[in-house]
């Protein structure tokens, strides 16, 4: 399951997930807790033993400033963020986040619930709280990467969990957004292990919004997961003991966004090359689908994916040892700044990148994957190869009391099942993606 992982909870020994029960992942690490001011990287290292980052550092690290200086800010584009329940304080929290980091509010933040009324927020409901954290991360950090894009928060009334649960409402909501021409890119920071669906047919029956998006030239993104080469079973607590993949990330009509770990100084300068996210808190999802055969856009990487669809396609920052700062106020007693990681972070960040490319191209790029893979042969494409790290996951203990490790995939030169095509230098990648 794709997890918005807050260091405040993780460093207490529990991973907070919007769509799964609390899962113990590590022990004996001191808690971060709620922060009254956003910490610097140096402060995080000194006090918590992990790196953490603020918006200006990623503007530097991903080379966004040259684009912003030329007016490529996402203006005129709309990013749809899809989350169960949403957050009751998102407008206020985004504004405080913007004020803190010297950002302007987006031209528009609109909230819709096309699949039915949202239940009243209950701060004692851990599922709702987890989704509110996810929503806040998605909105705030998509805004960092495309500061003048409009944001459309699409809330659904049923929690997405493993298997079919929650997906019919998501599909209905996404089809509404597409049919009413409300967004240019859709960001999905959730997923369910392919094997948890009752049948392959039940999964395939949920794809209508993706076909609809492709027909309307709307780009759809999906997070690749936070459990490396494995993922959650239907009981929401145990992990599969062999390699698996998750949907919608595995869908060929979706661009799968994986995770990297950045090592930056306080100014955002890289101190080392990016590597595959794999720290004590999680690892970037990746592998081959058990449902989808290799799509045409992956023919040139068939030696890696074989006959199946491989994920991820591209990767951005997701490490908890490299967490980003975000702000929320929906839960009394812990109002303030928190640290968060996961491919739930990488996906809205890449949604911002797509909004920049749409603006530069003067039209929607739509289904991104054929163009993305075609960039491999282009000079100056802005894709930065990730050649170090792996997404092996473990050791972890399941409810049977046994301890397991699922051996994942190594990053290599070129495409691999740990980082995809790699990560990006936005100043070069955005024009290349836009066809400039």
Image (cartoon, rainbow, N blue to C red):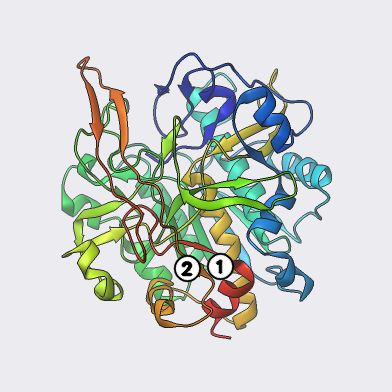
Please give the name of the residue rendered at 80% of the width and 46% of the height, measured from the top-left corner. 101
Nearer the observer: mark 1 or 2; the answer is: 1
Q: CA distance from mark 1 to mark 2?
A: 8 Å
* Quadrant for the C terminus in the image: bottom right
Spot occupied by residue 8 in the image (x, y as percentages of width and height): 59, 24
> Residue at 25% of width from left, 21% of height from top?
398
Dividing the picture into quadrants, the one containing residue 351 is bottom right
Q: Position of residue 416 (x, y in %)?
A: 32, 59
Going by the image, does 333 lie left or right of 187? right
Mark found first going from the N terminus, 1 or 2: 2
Left or right side of 141 for 165: left
Callout 2: few (<14), some (14-19), or many (20+) C-alpha neighbours within 10 Å? many
Does the CB distance between marks 1 and 2 fall below 8 Å? yes
Coordinates of residue 161 in the picture (x, y in percent): 36, 36
Depth check: give the residue in front, 38 or 248.
Answer: 38
The vertical placement of 217 against 62, above or below, is below
- Local SS, label 2: strand
Q: How many marks?
A: 2
- Residue 284 showing in the rendered view: yes
Q: Name the residue that disc number 2 marks.
A: 219
Q: Residues within 10 Å of mark 1 (few under 14, many from 20)?
A: many
424, above or below 405, in the image: below
- Can residue 183 be seen at all in this image of the molecule? no
Residue 215 numbered tag: none
* Residue at the spot of label 1: 354
Task: Please name whichever residue, 9 or 109, is drawn nearer the observer in this view of the structure.
Answer: 9
313 left or right, relative to 59: left
Between 73 and 91, the residue placed more toward the observer is 73
What residue is shown at x 74% (from left), y 36% (from top)? 40
Please tell me whether mark 1 sits on a helix, a strand or a loop: helix
């Amino acid at each position: 399951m794709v997890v918005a992982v807050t260091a405040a909870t993780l460093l207490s020994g529990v991973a907070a997930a919007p769509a799964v029960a609390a899962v113990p992942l590590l022990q004996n690490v001191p808690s971060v807790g709620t922060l009254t001011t956003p910490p610097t990287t140096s402060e995080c290292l000194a006090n918590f033993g992990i790196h953490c980052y603020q918006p200006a550092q990623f503007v530097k690290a991903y080379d966004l400033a040259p684009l912003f200086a030329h007016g490529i800010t996402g203006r005129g584009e709309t990013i749809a963020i899809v989350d169960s329940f949403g957050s009751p304080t998102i407008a206020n929290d985004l504004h405080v986040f913007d004020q803190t980091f010297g950002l302007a509010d987006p031209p528009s933040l609109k909230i819709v619930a096309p699949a039915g009324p949202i239940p009243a927020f209950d701060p004692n409901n851990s599922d709702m709280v987890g989704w509110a954290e996810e929503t806040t991360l998605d909105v705030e950090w998509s805004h960092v990467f495309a500061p003048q894009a409009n944001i459309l928060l699409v809330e659904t009334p049923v929690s997405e969990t493993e298997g079919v649960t929650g997906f019919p409402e998501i599909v209905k909501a996404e089809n509404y957004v597409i049919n009413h021409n409300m967004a240019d890119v859709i960001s999905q920071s959730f997923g369910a292990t392919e094997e948890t669906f009752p049948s392959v047919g039940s999964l395939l029956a949920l794809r209508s919004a993706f076909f609809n998006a492709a027909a309307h030239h709307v780009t759809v993104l999906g997070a690749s997961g936070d459990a490396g080469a494995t993922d959650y079973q239907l009981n929401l607590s145990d992990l599969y003991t062999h390699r698996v993949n998750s949907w919608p990330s595995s869908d060929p009509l979706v661009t799968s966004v994986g995770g990297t770990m950045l090592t930056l100084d306080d100014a955002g300068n890289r101190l080392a090359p990016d590597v595959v996210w794999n720290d004590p808190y999680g690892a970037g999802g990746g592998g081959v689908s058990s449902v989808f055969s290799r799509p045409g856009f992956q023919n040139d990487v068939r030696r890696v994916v074989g006959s199946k669809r491989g994920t991820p396609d591209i990767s951005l920052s997701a490490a908890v040892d490299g967490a980003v700062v975000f702000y929320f106020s929906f839960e009394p007693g812990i109002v303030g700044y928190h640290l968060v990681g996961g491919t739930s972070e990488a996906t809205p960040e890449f949604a911002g990148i797509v909004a920049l490319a749409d603006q530069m191209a003067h039209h929607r790029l739509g289904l991104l994957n054929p163009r993305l893979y075609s960039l491999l042969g282009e000079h100056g494409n802005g894709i930065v190869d990730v050649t170090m790290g792996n997404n092996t996951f473990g050791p972890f203990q399941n409810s049977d009391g046994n301890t397991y490790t699922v051996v994942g995939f190594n990053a290599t030169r070129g495409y691999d099942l740990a980082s995809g095509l790699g990560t990006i230098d936005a100043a070069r990648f955005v024009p290349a993606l836009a066809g400039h």
